Image (cartoon, rainbow, N blue to C red):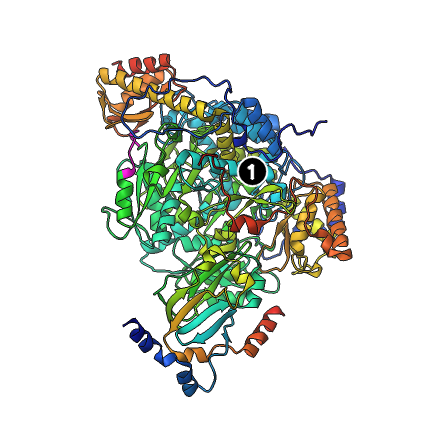
Amino acid sequence: MNYIPHTDAHISKMLTTIDCRTVDDLVPEQVPRAARLNLGEPMSEMDVASYIESLAAKNIQTKCFAGGGSYDHYIPSAISHIVLRGEFLTAYTPYQAEASQGMLQALYEYQSYICLLTGMDVSNASLYDGASALAEAVLLAHSHTKRRGVFVDVGLNPAYLQVLRTYCEGADIFISDTINNDVACIIQQTPAFDGSIRDPTHMAEKAHRNGSLFISCISDPTSLAIMRPPGEAGADIVTGEGQSFGIPKSFGGPCLGFMAVKSTLTKKLPGRIVGATQDESGRRGFVLTLQAREQFIRRERATSNITTNQTLLALSATIYLALLGRTGLRSVAHTSYRRAHRLQQMLHTRGFRIMTPGPFYNEFLVETPRPVTDILEHLRQWDILGGVAVDDHRLLVCCTEKNTIPDVETYARGASMQ
Amino acid sequence: MIAQDHDTPGNLIFDYDQANTGHIQTDEDDIKDQFPKRDYLPLPDVSEMQVIRHYTRLSRKNYGIDTGIYPLGSCTMKYNPRVNEDMARLPGFAGIHPHAPLSHAQGALEVMWDLQEALKEITGMDAFSLQPAAGSQGELLGVMIAKRYFADMGERRTRIIIPDSAHGTNPATAATCRFQTVTVHSDERGNMDLDGFRNAIGDDVAVVMITNPNTLGFYEEHLQEITELSRKHGTLLYCDGANMNAMLGISKPAEQGFDMMHLNLHKTFSTPHGGGGPGGGALGVRSFLEEYLPVPRVVKRDSGPTFDLDYDYDKSIGRIHSFYGNFGIMLRALTYIKSWGSDIVNVSEAALLNANYLLGLIRDIFDVPYDRPCAHEFVVSTRRFGEKSALNMAKRMIDYGFHPPTIYFPLIVKEALMIEPTETESKETLDRLAGVLAAIAREAERDPSMLDGTPHTAATGRLDEVMAARHLDLRWRPPKE
Amino acid sequence: MHAAIYYLDTAPWSNSFLKKIFKFDLLVRRYTKDHEWVDTTDDGIIVGITEFAQDQLGDVVSVELPEVGISYRHNDAIAIIDSVKTSTDVYSPVDGRVTHVNESLLSQPELINKSPYQDGWIVKMMPESPAQLESLLTKDQYDESVGNTEK
């Protein structure tokens, strides 16, 4: 396919206008020329589509009982119909507010939704993903407290911990084994990696007594429809992964990092923030605001280096939340919760040891009576992705509203077959 | 009338709360477990039709590439082929869980492998990581790797050299990794000043970060000297690949002397910018840095399933994404690269031609700070029209139905307009854009105050950014709060 | 007790003392090339930004102030002033300790625009060495430097 509109006549006319013989004349002699690239023959749209479809056909899609940071919630049809509108899809960062009111208002609504769900005061307009959102929260805590330590409570998604370690090494921050006076923040994930619901109150108090910030990290944010919002339990920063809100699993990306803070930390927030304002005749409009925090103005003193974020996915999440509303989101949360508890009961009676202590949301960890790989292999024959193998004998199982009761029963039967 | 707006124009989604939306109710109080619960979920219930109308209405207040030319400098707003969207939405890709067994994800891994191979060929780099979710994260990863590399060598290097024309992300990234930024000024041809560079370079410089072509739209002419001096001091050379749209098939950054670089997949390889993301920030390195790349890495095996994820790299920097990066963006970029094949050089050649042609059409209307051919974009100054003229002229363009270029960047040019037409715009469109700029210049000459308060025909008039920053209103609140 | 310490701290700064040592009157406003102004009083110096600087910045939307009691070296960044499109550091004109900050700027950043020399003052400091004040610019020198900047 060729997406260049010029005819040969156009090209020669344009070259004449700029008084040039060939385009190569425009490139200084100091620039070393590349040999012709070896990228294969050009393909027509039909050919490229059939090639990419052939790759898609090599993937095998099954019923999904896996979570661990990516959740198989139902995606309402209406979302892609809006998100694919070219005015949204093909715009960029709304630097020119007057030509970008649609996206700016949608982001203002997104920020509002995140605040309503988390019980926090202020949200940014998205970050890359759950893991880097958490890492950015730690950088914020460091810059706010001037302390260099991070205390991580048990139960954090191991991939998030890895990302955190990488960011910490870069920023000369260390992960602390104790809560001491060099600890900038305490991180607690809820629901935790093993699915258990935590009460953040205790850890939040501990953090504040120590002069540290408390960061609450949310795994599946549909849980916020029934859990007490972390903002009410003393969180200073809430981060998480918003993929559950109408975004395809898509092999792990793009996803949606969210971050919300208490108002005292507003000016330390990384990333874009949209604010409401007025035009000269008093009409409400929306603009990117507090831009002096950002890299393109403050350069080496910026609160973060982030530039492009995940706007289109923030729009997806906004439409998802609008479509579901309080009734729909509670229904998703209740159903996911009930299905997971039903499956957990069934596995328990079939000899799986329950490893998740206390109340859990839609994920739970089990110790398997036989090697995890055997069980996953059995389930595959029933067209089921059985969960996330944590190690040889532990399996993380997840349910959403998409896992029907017959599927749950099939899972239990398949998993207990020898 | 088609454009009739049945809703109150200023409404937020929160203003539509309805009692009955057709949602199926669930039993509310059947959760007996003891954990802190929420009393009330303050989200509005809105019917599907109302949601569709609301966001359709908002979309009509937004300008995209599909609306018209979007000449935002440094952002490469080229046409986004629709087949890419269809490919990314194939259930075989969109429906794959990141923890699916790799035997079920061979197609996805092949996409990543093929893209890595293509990017290696395009840039000359020896290895790629596709994990970074955007250019700025690619850059961050690059500087983290540099930091670890020197730590491994037992060297303590504290400085990073960045030219004054650089994007703000470069110094912000350096600072995030606790490096001190040394700014080198630009010379009279818009290159990094060689004398300034000689003074700045030293054994304590970890990295030199260069955008090539730079943000003034010029290929760096002193790269050979800069490379030699950097090598002498053991300094790594980093290429910010934001402007790769000027180099496809023309020149390879590795052959220019760069040790590492990031690509902005959403810019160069036509994945839609989505109103500000998602993007993709693949990082490429030369072989001596390969072992530091993040895990997991996609590898090709001789036995078993062909493609695998390998976590076993002792020196790896770790990980920077929850999973493997913005897979959906990789898929679109691969579709685009496969469409072009080896002919992709046409993209950069047309990008150069379009930028130089447009510059030729408007160079007499504005001040041209550096008199030389540009690459895929250029910068002019509106200073002859007075203070705030770049802002005023940009806003006026909206009245003419054109998206404005980047303004007030790079910082070293006063009243800067930074214009990147991209290769997908036709000669007729460029002629029209030049005509509009000429018309606005005539208006400004006649009566500069005519441009104050523009645009007049957009969804709103000029918005008060000072008010927005002084009186923060960042969210809707339920009335009872 | 408080008054006694106050006196000991500030005695070398009484204007008469300074006038005796240096041949000029420090009560006259001094400037830096980075567009700060510096007034000397009996309890230290007052620092703000000049009319020229506030005009260049445009509408100030927020100010970050240092903590009282912290000591800074000459040219350290002591405060940050943000306008919509730019962000600038305020540099310490001398070595010294911050004694007061203008907290009204936190809620009314526009004071820097409206009244840069009066209500828009930024910090008060206790300098370490009087000699550093001597090297600050006079009004004429500052005006000349602004002229140069504008070229």
Q: Nearer the viewer, residue C15 or C50?
A: C15
Residue B316 in sight: no
Taking the image as shown, residue C143 lies to the left or right of residue A219, namely right
Q: From which residue to which does the magenta span run?
A: A193-201
- Quadrant placement of the N terminus of chain A: top right
Say which quarter of the image contains residue A238: top left
Taking the image as shown, residue A394 lies to the left or right of residue B327, namely left
Residue at the spot 39% in from the left edge and 39% down from the top edge: A239
Measured along the vertical axis of the image, is residue A63 above or below residue B474? above
Residue A325 in sight: yes
Measured along the vertical axis of the image, is residue A95 above or below residue C134? above
Q: Nearer the viewer, residue B88 or C128?
A: C128
| Crowd around label 1: few <14 · some 14–19 · many ≥20 (10 Å) | many
Q: Which residue is mark 1?
A: A105
Chain under numbered label 1: A
Indicate the position of residue B203 as horizontal and vertical percent values.
Answer: 39, 64
Residue at the spot 49% in from the left edge and 28% down from the top edge: B44
- Quadrant placement of the C terminus of chain A: top left
Taking the image as shown, residue B120 lies to the left or right of residue A41, namely left
